[in-house]
Image (spheres, helix red, strand yellow):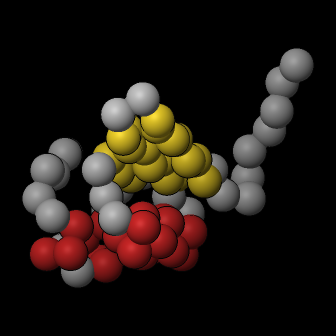
């Protein structure tokens, strides 16, 4: 399921049903809230946005992940 609604309009429990949360175009406050919710429920979290020629991507995969070389 996907939702394009404003995350401020959703209660925390709404996000607990997802296995991954991907946020784009959110404010710093919204990203912080979504990351907190994701951590509390063991959900993978990705956030990104673009500002002209500048952009960012943030990922929080929680405590359980492995790296491969």
Q: Position of residue 40 (x, y in %)?
A: 54, 75
Q: Using residue 22 as the reference point, say whether residue 3 is left or right of it.
A: left
Residue 26: quadrant of the picture: bottom left
Q: What residue sits 62% from the left and 50% below the top? A: 61
Q: How many labels, in total? A: 0
Q: What residue sits 51% from the left and 41% below the top? A: 56
Where is the N terminus found, in terms of image quarters?
Answer: top left
Specify whether residue 16 is in view: no
Q: Using residue 6 as the reference point, say whether residue 34 is left or right of it.
A: right
Q: Using residue 35 as the reference point, say whether residue 10 is left or right of it.
A: left
Specify whether residue 23 is in view: yes
Q: Is residue 16 above or below residue 26?
A: below
Where is the C terminus found, in terms of image quarters?
Answer: top right
Q: Nearer the viewer, residue 1 or 30?
A: 30
Q: Position of residue 52 (x, y in %)?
A: 35, 34
Q: Is residue 53 above or below residue 31?
A: above
Residue furthest to the front: 53
Q: What residue sits 80% from the left and 38% below the top? A: 66
Q: Position of residue 18 (x, y in %)?
A: 35, 55
Residue furthest to the top: 69
Q: Nearer the viewer, residue 14 or 60?
A: 60
Q: Is residue 24 above or below residue 43?
A: above
């Amino acid at each position: 399921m996907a939702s394009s609604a404003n995350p401020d309009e959703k209660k925390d429990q709404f996000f607990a049903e997802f296995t991954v949360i991907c946020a784009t175009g959110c404010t710093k406050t919204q990203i912080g809230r979504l990351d907190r919710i994701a951590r509390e429920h063991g959900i993978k979290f990705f956030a990104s946005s673009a500002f002209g020629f500048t952009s960012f991507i943030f990922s929080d995969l929680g405590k359980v992940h492995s790296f491969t070389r």
